[in-house]
Every structure is written in structure tokens, then in C-alpha cells.
């Protein structure tokens, strides 16, 4: 490929073809579609050219097309032809010998799990089966180069995995087919490809194996930490501690006790003996006093304000408080204990790894990025330090990995 572009020039790049799976990742649909269309000569390149087995796509497009199988992003099917008739048609167009057509078509129907839909017109097929048929058409005749433009668009996760397995198996089975994939799915690129190129602004910024890109351009480690769940005994004891504290708060207003009476529907005077933990709900005023009593009023101020509360469950707790006007004591207690544990682990991570940054919570897990590379810590050092302190911090499980392809791609995109 030499300075090929549909809109802007693309630097020279040579590709090994046989039995190789290449992917292009790009932030723009336009650039990706133009690239595939340019290879197929649906659009003329504004500059440069590309060679398919030595055949110039600009000066000899018909000969170049003979070596290409192409699956467009949007299905180009004839609605009244059946799946089987589509494959027979394209097998003849691609020059498959007449005596072999039945066997070749049957093979593709079986490979793509389309045998039960073989005699259905294409307009009656589901979106996923239409994509399967489009990829099968591209693969029929075993062309040396197959170009797939978003082959799994609109498919559910199970169907996507099936499609990836089929494409990978067919492309590598005989070692005679190279696949060029354009996609916006990092999972698809990693599942299928031996080499990945990242395009930004119409230019190829880097190319290499997934591991090469992670090693070369990944400058941090991804850390995900999940604390132990709150034990029911600890939760019960903390609820009891707060409940008993209602009657020890210094100079609390009478309105606070009125709030408690309303919350539990009390008829008799309130005493520690006739209050059930599960019946108590906490208003904003009560939360403020409890936070002051527990020694962290700032944490409660965030909860009762319009901003999201810190720690795990913070967003859900804030939404519940603003929706209902109060929070049940057990829910508040679980959030408080979980946030205490979160704060302890967070302080440990940020103080142990210089340059570490917190990247939010995912359910019960906390995500961090740790510096990595020549000037950062090694993977072994990070594992060792966390493992030595795991029990003391109450960490149930954790994972540590290199930068994801998505992070690397976003880095290139942000620099453009």
C-alpha cells in the first residue's frame, strides 16, 4: 500500500498477507468506510495507490478484484434471492468450477450456521443472519484477501462470538487467506487479529500485534480492587451503635426525636428497647447529626447535597435520598462501612504508588491507573506490594494488567 487515501494521503505501509489478520481502528466511520471502499475501487483514491498481489488497484482494478472478497458495512443483498442462491451466484461470479459449486455452497452454509435458512429469501432473514450471509459471500471461493467492514454490526454478543470463531477458523485453516478488518470494537480486533493498526485523522499512526502496541505505547497499569463484603454481624453492630446513639446525642433538638417517632410510627414514647433497626429511616437533619457524631460531617454534607456521595453505592444512595427524602438505617450503615473500607484502600493505593490515579467505581470494585514503564514501577513490584497488604486492607480480589487497546487508542485520538 503506497500513500493510499480516499480523502487524505496515507503513509506507505507494506503488509504481509498470507494467513494474517489485520485490523484498522478509527474514531471516524467516514475514514474507515472510505478505506474499504477504496480497496474495492467503489471510490477513487485522491492520492497514492495499493497493490493486491502486485496488481495496481488504480490501473488494473478488474484484475485486483479477482483476488478480493468484500463484506460491506451495510448488507448488499438481493431481497428475493435465497441464502443458497446468493452463494451460488457469487460462486459463479468468482469462477468456482461448476462441478464444485454445490459442495462449496454447502460448506459455507454449514460454516455460518445458515443451513436451516438456505431456502429463505434474504428479506426474511434476521439482521444477524444477513451479516453471516454477507461474510459468507466474501469468503466464498477462498480469495487470498478478504476485506470485512464492521462484520458483526448489530449482532448480539453470542452471535458475535460465533461469527468471530468462524472467521478466524476459515481465515487460518489453510493459511492462504489474509483478512483486513475495519472495526470500532476493541474486543473484535483483539479476538480476531494478529496485527492492529490505529488510524487517526485518516492517517495510520501505528501498527503491530496487540501485545506490541500494549508494550510500546502503554504507559500505565490497570488496577481493579474489590474489597470484602460487609459482614452481617458488623452491619448489625453498627446499626445498634447508631440506634443507641440517638439517646446520647448531646443537646439534640426535640424535632429530631419527632422525626424518629414519625419514621417508626411510634405510639409509645421512644426508648432503645422499643426501636427496631429495620424500622428506622434517617432524614437529612438526622444524617447531619449522625455524621457529626461519627466524626466525619464532610462525608454527610456530600451525601445530603446535590452532588454524588463518595465511595461505593454513593450514586444510588444520593438518588434514594432525593427521591424519598430519607434513607433506611441499615442501608446508610452499609454505605458508611463500605465507604470507610474504600477510603482505607484508596489512601493505601495513592500513597503506595506515586502518580496513581483513581478512575471510579464499577459496582463493588475500584479502578486505578498506576504509572508503568522505564520510570514507573514494574508489574512484579506492584503485585508484590498489594499481595503483602491484601489481608490487612480487606481486599477480596484484585486484577493488575497492562493498558487496554481502548486506552491506547484514546491516547492517540486525544493527541490528534
Image (cartoon, rainbow, N blue to C red):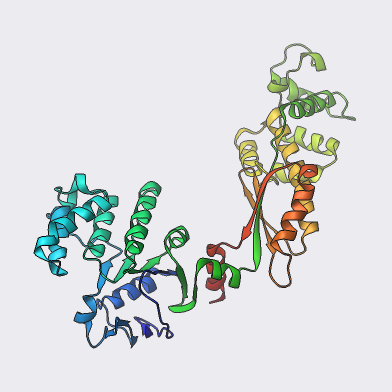
- Residue 383: image x %, image y %? 72, 55
Looking at the picture, tell me which residue is in the foreground, 84 or 284: 84
Q: With 34 as the anchor, is 223 left or right in this view?
A: right
Task: Say if residue 27 shows up in the picture.
Answer: no
Q: With 324 as the anchor, is 16 left or right in this view?
A: left
Residue 341 occupies which quadrant of the picture? top right
Residue 335 occupies which quadrant of the picture? top right
- Residue 323: image x %, image y %? 60, 36
Residue at (81%, 35%) from the top-left corner? 289
Picture layout, residue 238 above or below residue 297:
above
Picture layout, residue 84 above or below residue 74:
above
Single out the residue that lies furthest toward the left: 98
Residue at (79%, 46%) from the top-left corner? 298
Task: Say if residue 229 shows up in the picture.
Answer: yes
Q: With 115 as the anchor, is 334 left or right in this view?
A: right
Quadrant the N terminus occupies: bottom left
Residue at (84%, 38%) from the top-left corner? 292
Picture layout, residue 331 above or below residue 390:
above
Single out the residue that lies furthest toward the front: 174
- Residue 318: image x %, image y %? 65, 41
Looking at the picture, tell me which residue is in the foreground, 15 or 299: 15
- Residue 188: image x %, image y %? 43, 59
Amino acid at each position: 500500500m503506497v500513500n493510499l487515501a480516499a480523502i487524505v494521503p496515507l503513509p506507505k505501509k507494506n503488509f504481509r498477507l498470507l494467513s494474517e489478520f489485520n485490523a484498522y481502528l478509527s474514531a471516524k466511520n467516514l475514514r474507515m468506510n472510505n478505506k474499504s471502499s477504496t480497496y474495492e475501487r467503489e471510490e477513487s483514491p485522491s492520492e497514492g495507490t495499493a497493490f493486491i498481489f502486485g496488481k495496481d488497484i488504480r490501473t488494473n482494478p478488474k484484475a485486483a478484484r479477482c483476488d478480493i472478497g468484500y463484506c460491506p458495512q451495510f448488507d448488499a443483498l438481493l431481497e428475493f434471492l435465497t441464502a443458497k442462491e446468493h452463494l451460488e451466484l457469487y460462486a459463479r461470479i468468482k469462477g468456482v468450477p461448476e462441478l464444485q459449486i454445490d459442495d462449496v455452497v454447502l460448506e459455507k452454509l454449514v460454516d455460518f450456521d445458515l443451513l436451516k435458512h438456505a431456502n429463505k429469501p434474504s428479506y426474511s432473514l434476521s439482521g444477524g443472519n444477513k451479516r453471516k450471509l454477507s461474510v459468507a459471500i466474501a469468503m466464498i471461493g477462498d480469495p487470498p484477501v478478504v476485506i470485512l467492514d464492521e462484520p458483526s454490526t448489530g449482532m448480539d454478543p453470542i452471535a458475535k462470538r460465533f461469527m468471530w470463531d468462524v472467521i478466524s477458523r476459515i481465515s487460518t485453516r489453510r493459511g492462504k487467506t489474509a483478512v483486513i478488518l475495519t472495526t470500532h470494537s476493541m474486543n473484535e480486533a483483539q479476538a480476531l487479529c494478529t496485527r492492529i493498526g490505529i488510524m487517526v485523522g485518516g492517517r495510520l499512526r501505528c501498527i503491530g500485534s496487540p501485545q506490541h502496541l500494549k508494550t510500546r505505547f502503554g504507559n500505565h497499569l490497570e488496577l481493579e480492587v474489590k474489597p470484602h463484603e460487609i459482614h452481617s454481624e458488623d452491619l448489625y453492630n453498627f446499626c445498634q451503635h447508631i440506634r443507641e446513639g440517638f439517646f446520647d446525642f448531646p443537646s439534640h433538638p426535640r424535632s429530631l426525636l419527632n422525626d424518629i417517632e414519625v419514621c417508626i410510627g411510634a405510639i409509645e414514647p421512644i426508648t432503645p428497647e422499643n426501636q427496631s433497626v429495620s424500622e428506622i429511616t434517617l432524614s437529612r437533619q438526622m444524617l447531619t447529626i449522625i455524621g457529626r457524631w461519627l466524626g466525619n460531617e464532610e462525608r454527610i454534607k456530600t451525601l445530603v447535597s446535590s452532588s454524588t456521595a463518595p465511595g461505593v453505592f454513593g450514586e444510588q444512595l444520593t438518588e434514594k435520598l432525593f427521591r424519598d427524602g430519607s434513607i433506611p438505617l441499615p442501608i446508610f450503615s452499609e454505605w458508611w462501612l463500605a465507604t470507610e473500607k474504600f477510603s482505607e484502600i484508596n489512601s493505601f493505593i495513592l500513597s503506595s504508588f506515586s502518580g496513581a490515579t483513581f478512575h471510579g467505581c464499577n459496582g463493588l470494585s475500584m479502578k486505578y491507573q498506576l504509572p508503568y514503564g522505564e520510570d514507573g514501577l514494574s508489574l512484579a513490584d506492584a503485585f508484590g506490594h498489594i499481595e503483602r497488604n491484601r489481608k490487612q486492607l480487606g481486599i477480596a480480589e484484585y486484577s493488575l494488567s497492562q493498558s487496554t487497546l481502548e486506552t491506547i487508542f484514546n491516547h492517540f485520538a486525544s493527541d490528534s
